[in-house]
Image (cartoon, grey):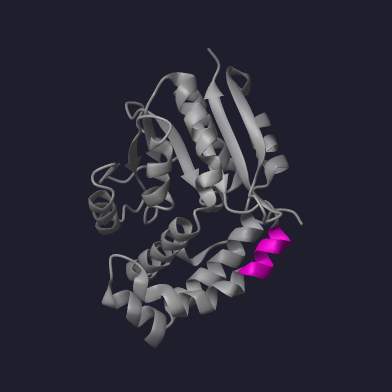
Amino acid sequence: MRRRQLVELEDLDWCPRAVRDGGTDWLAFMANQTKIFSAVVPKIRSAMAAVGTNQVLDLCSGAGGPWLTLVDELARSGPVEVQLSDRFPNVAAFLALQARSQGRLGFREKPIDAADVPGELPGVRTLFNCFHHFPPDVAAEILNDAVRKRRPIAIFEGVNHRTIGLVAIPLQLPAMLLLMPFVKPFRWSRMLLTYVLPMIPFIVVFDGTISLLRIYLPDELRALVARLPNADSFEWDIGTTPLPGLGIGLTHLVGVPRP
């Protein structure tokens, strides 16, 4: 099954902010509860070590993705400072994460374009479960921007098999109905849009299905890198990070500047 360039509802300008934020709140909650991205901590630390930095700039952060738990796990191997950012910054979520992480997570309040990141912003650029939102031309430009500005980049997607992911997506519905009241910070709008007017469950399942059809698998990531004019100025690690005991893995791309 090859990648398809489709449209997710949360990408549309008319998507209500409360629905978009409710969906990303849920995805961040699940990422931190399951801790599936713990497996990629060594790859992030290795990219940091390659350029001698303790800083991470997370792009397209949504509601913070896995960082509430991931920052603690990354800190076990050395100092780390994480800045969250997004084209549509969810400042309320970022402030809550900053408080819950005791200041370990910072954020950029102004919108950040992943394809044109201000050159003065340091650190390893990370993208979690979001690279599939971009069509190939924009995705290649995100990679090229990192190469051009000599910034390491680490991209992770939550599955390496489209069919298995498509089968699992509907399983989120009972989980949402059971666990949504435990998503922090608590918001009545999220309860209304889950249990009364179930727009959040709809967008999570619909966009989740589209996401799996849009996701870049390792061979497609290699094809994107091959398009970059100065790809050989970076070292690239593209493949699958296994998830122990699950029989599936995370798709990853890590690029660091050559000395």
Name above or below for residue 171 compared with residue 11: below
Write down the region rendered in magenta.
162-168
Determine the residue located farthest toward the right in the rendered image. 1
Name above or below for residue 167 compared with residue 133: below
Q: Name the residue nearer the viewer: 17 or 188.
A: 188
Q: Is residue 188 left or right of residue 194?
A: left
Residue 187, position in %: x, y?
Answer: 28, 72
Q: Is residue 236 left or right of residue 257?
A: right
Q: Residue at x 48, y 44 (%)?
A: 127
The part of the image, by quadrant, that contains residue 188 is: bottom left
What secondary structure is the magenta-colored segment mainly? helix
Q: Inspect this view and state whether residue 174 appears.
A: yes
Residue 209, position in %: x, y?
Answer: 61, 66
- Asked if the magenta segment contains residue 142, the reply would be no
Q: Name the residue nearer the viewer: 164 or 114.
A: 164
Determine the residue located farthest toward the bottom in the rendered image. 196
Q: Inspect this view and state whether residue 227 appears.
A: no
The part of the image, by quadrant, that contains residue 85 is: top left
Q: Name the residue nearer the viewer: 53 or 230.
A: 53
- The quadrant in which the N terminus is found is bottom right
